[in-house]
Amino acid sequence: MITVVKIGGNILDDPSSLESFIVKFAGLAGKKVLVHGGGKVADQIAKKMGVVLKIVDGRRITDLQTLDIITMVYAGLINKNLVADLNALGCNAIGVCGADANLMIANRRPMAEIDYGFVGDITFVNAEILTNWLNIGICPVISPITHDGHGQLLNTNADTIASSVALAISKFFSVRLVYCFEKKGVLKDVNDEGSVIPFLDEKITNDLKERGMIHSGMLPKLENAINTVKGGVDAVYIGHAEELEWLIEGKSGTKIIH
Amino acid sequence: MITVVKIGGNILDDPSSLESFIVKFAGLAGKKVLVHGGGKVADQIAKKMGVVLKIVDGRRITDLQTLDIITMVYAGLINKNLVADLNALGCNAIGVCGADANLMIANRRPMAEIDYGFVGDITFVNAEILTNWLNIGICPVISPITHDGHGQLLNTNADTIASSVALAISKFFSVRLVYCFEKKGVLKDVNDEGSVIPFLDEKITNDLKERGMIHSGMLPKLENAINTVKGGVDAVYIGHAEELEWLIEGKSGTKIIH
């Protein structure tokens, strides 16, 4: 069983939560993959550099200057520090982005009403090289940058990367995917951490969606999770980063199956 | 025969020289490794961020803030763009620093009269993982950052990295090492590009050194080269990045052998 874990921005921004997560992730038994997001560091660095990062409808516009900054921060600063920390705990991690060994190739998103800039939608995941690494005991740590195969780096959503990677290696291994963030799971009431929905499948999710019971911010994550289990991943877990080992035992968080 | 190529900062700073070099490197036949330096981008980013990079006796002092900036720029921005460009040319490159898969472990340099900060001297190169990559057709692209194995990233001289990597894999392969920079080779007269010394070994180098005929900036590079060929690397070539393919054919630059 391979465990693919995605760690979100809010955990990366909080040194003590991050440290605790790293220890838990390093301690996970079996083969594993870590996918990380960005957090607020890119915004802080941009601000120091006098660059204004543009957001439209809650989404970042990746112009060339922004792309350079997130490449530095995601693939450099965050990725290499995570790798050094994991290796200190005996994890044998390798930090990569989609350009490395052609791990993930993407198409630049076509310009619609809004031009999101250098943003990529994944078209190919190199499952062969992931399998090679996993089989020799290496833990890939993946930053959310892809490339188009013609020399252009592209900003890509980390949730989508986690799901695409899990799906690609599910052709060769049993795979579970864990989305770790700062909430205890999918909540019935977004203001009540005690209202975690322990179990979801497509039917229950659709029912809840129709009754307007799923928070808009959670909706893309859940649709992504449903597609992932439909595509061949054993289960998707959504929950708090500090409860990583309980999540995969079903003792905490939300479990989504086909 | 494995070709390890080190590309220096001045080439990285000039887009047209860099593009031309990348095409030549991608076109090199056989298994190969690229080691890159930093260039002036780190200084430019630091300046934009309002950080003053400290230099003492011509050497950078790597405090924590500087370490973050060079990690971003070397392991992120420069490394990932090189990799995307090489992969666009069919090179199958992977960008790594010393922390990745424990590629290079270093000791933080002990504090002497000057504290150079987070600077590492290499103690171990993971020849096994390099051999694995080379044997499956992957070209490692190495940025000059190492780690101490306890979670600390360290700034490390790229010339030394190139030499250490070449020596480590020379246990398993025939290896040649090429130092590419903006001069045509080791020059008898530093102001005359026509005065390239075509051939050097330890004896000739010592003679020239005693007669004060080697420029001080070239001395550490040459001593490094002599040690590398004494350690088991077939030959070291020093010359202009734009003449890469002529260098290894002995038609240009300086060739150093044991």
Image (cartoon, coloured by chain):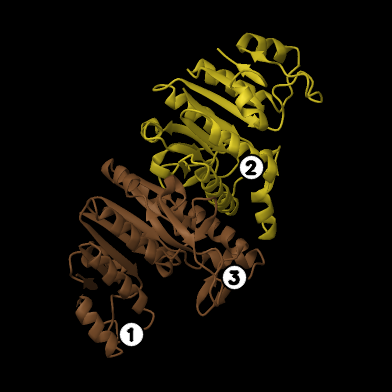
Chain colours: A yellow, B brown
Element type where label 3 sits in the image: loop
Residue B47 lies left or right of residue A34; in this view the side is right
Residue under circle 3? B53
Kind of element beneath mark 1: loop
Q: Position of residue A72 (x, y in %)?
A: 55, 53
Tag 2: amino acid: Glu
The secondary element bearing badge 2 is classed as helix
Q: Residue furthest right?
A: A191
**Mark 2 lies on residue:** A19
Residues marked 2 and 1 touching at CB (< 8 Å):
no
**A115 left or right of B236?**
right
| Mark 1 chain | B
In the picture, measured across the screen, residue B14 lies left or right of residue B151, that is left
Q: Quadrant of residue A216?
A: top right
Mark nearest the camera among 1 and 3 is 3
Residue B229 place in picture, x, y as percent: 24, 66
